[in-house]
Image: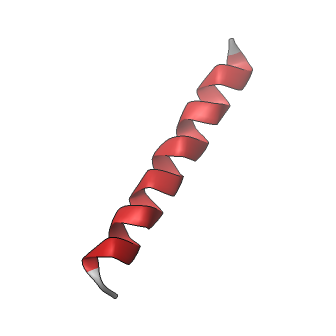
């Protein structure tokens, strides 16, 4: 896995966590 794919996967994880937090508000 290249660094770009790892970066993209990390962004996706952060985005999902952010969306979950926004939904709770």
**Residue at 60% of width from left, 25% of height from top?**
21
Give the vertical position of 2 relative to 18 (above or below): below
Q: Residue furthest top?
A: 25
Q: Is residue 10 above or below residue 14?
A: below
Quadrant the N terminus occupies: bottom left
User: Measured along the vertical axis of the image, is residue 20 above or below residue 10?
Assistant: above
Residue 24, image x, y percentages: 70, 19
- Residue at 40 percent across and 58 percent down: it is 10
Task: Reply above or below: 25 against 15.
Answer: above
- Residue projecting furthest to the bottom: 1
Q: Quadrant of the C terminus?
A: top right
Q: Position of residue 3 (x, y in %)?
A: 26, 76
- Judged from this view, the residue extending furthest toward the right is 23
Please give left or right for residue 7 compared with residue 9 in the image.
Answer: left
Q: Which residue is at 52% across, 55% downward?
A: 12
Which residue sits at x=29%, y=84%?
A: 2
Expressed as whole percent of the image width and height from the top left, the position of residue 5 reads 39, 75
């Amino acid at each position: 896995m290249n660094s770009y794919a790892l970066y993209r996967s990390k962004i996706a994880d952060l985005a999902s966590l952010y969306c979950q937090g926004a939904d709770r508000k």
